[in-house]
Amino acid sequence: MTARKTSRTAVARRASTRGERIDFRVNPGTKDLLVRAAALRGSNLTSFVLESAQERAAELIEQYERLKLTNRDRDRLLDALAEPPRPVAALRKLFEKRAAGA
């Protein structure tokens, strides 16, 4: 019984140190393509697929998180930053009240 507990403990310990698992199926042509590309890179299939997926994921996230402006919008933004509009009187009053602690 002790050997069995040790075995289960060892299996649990090994499982907890491994990363997450992703399984998927591909057609033979796709697998051949990926194996060939991995060999050209001097890598195994798993490493190649993982590295490629990570690179693409990082590119995609960066692409979606980057601010996209047309040339016109960019020019308007830069103009507004270079010469911001003067605050209106109501806004000045509000800041004065805030500064006075009201």
Image (tube, grey):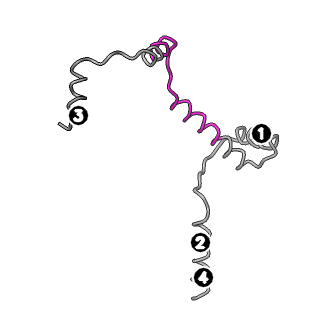
Which circle, 3 or 2, is nearer the viewer?
3
Mark 4 Cα-neighbour bin, 10 Å: few <14, some 14–19, many ≥20: few
Q: Are marks 3 and 2 in contact (CB under 8 Å)?
A: no
| Residue 65 on the magenta span | yes
Q: Residue furthest top?
A: 72
State yes or no: discs 1 and 2 in contact (Cβ < 8 Å).
Answer: no
Whichever of labels 1 and 3 marks the residue nearer the N terminus, that label is 1
Q: Could you classify mark 3 by the number of other residues whose Cα lies within 10 Å: few (under 14), some (14-19), or many (20 or more)?
A: few
First-in-chain label (3 vs 4):
4
Secondary structure at numbered mark 1? helix
Decide which of 98, 47 is in the foreground and name it. 98
Secondary structure of residue under mark 3: helix
Q: Nearer the viewer, residue 84 or 15?
A: 84
Q: Residue at x 77, y 39 (%)?
A: 37
Q: Earlier in the sequence, mark 2 or mark 4?
A: 4
Return the x and y of residue 80 as percentages of the image width and height: 42, 16
Q: Nearer the viewer, mark 1 or mark 2?
A: 2
Residue carrying label 3: 98
At a point 58% along the width and 77% down the height, the residue shown is: 8
Say which residue appears at 62% left-offset and 46% top-offset. 25
Q: Which residue is tagged 1?
A: 37
Q: Secondary structure at mark 4?
A: helix
Span of residues in magenta: 53-77
Sequence-wise first label, 3 or 2 = 2
By secondary structure, the bulk of the magenta-drawn segment is best described as helix
User: Mark 1 or mark 2: which comes first in sequence?
Assistant: 2
Closer to the camera: disc 3 or disc 4? Answer: 3
Amino acid type of disc 4?
A: Thr
Q: Which residue is mark 4?
A: 6
Q: Nearer the viewer, mark 2 or mark 4?
A: 2
Magenta-colored stretch includes residue 46:
no
Kindly report the distance in space between the C-alpha atoms of the residues bearing marks 1 and 3. 64 Å
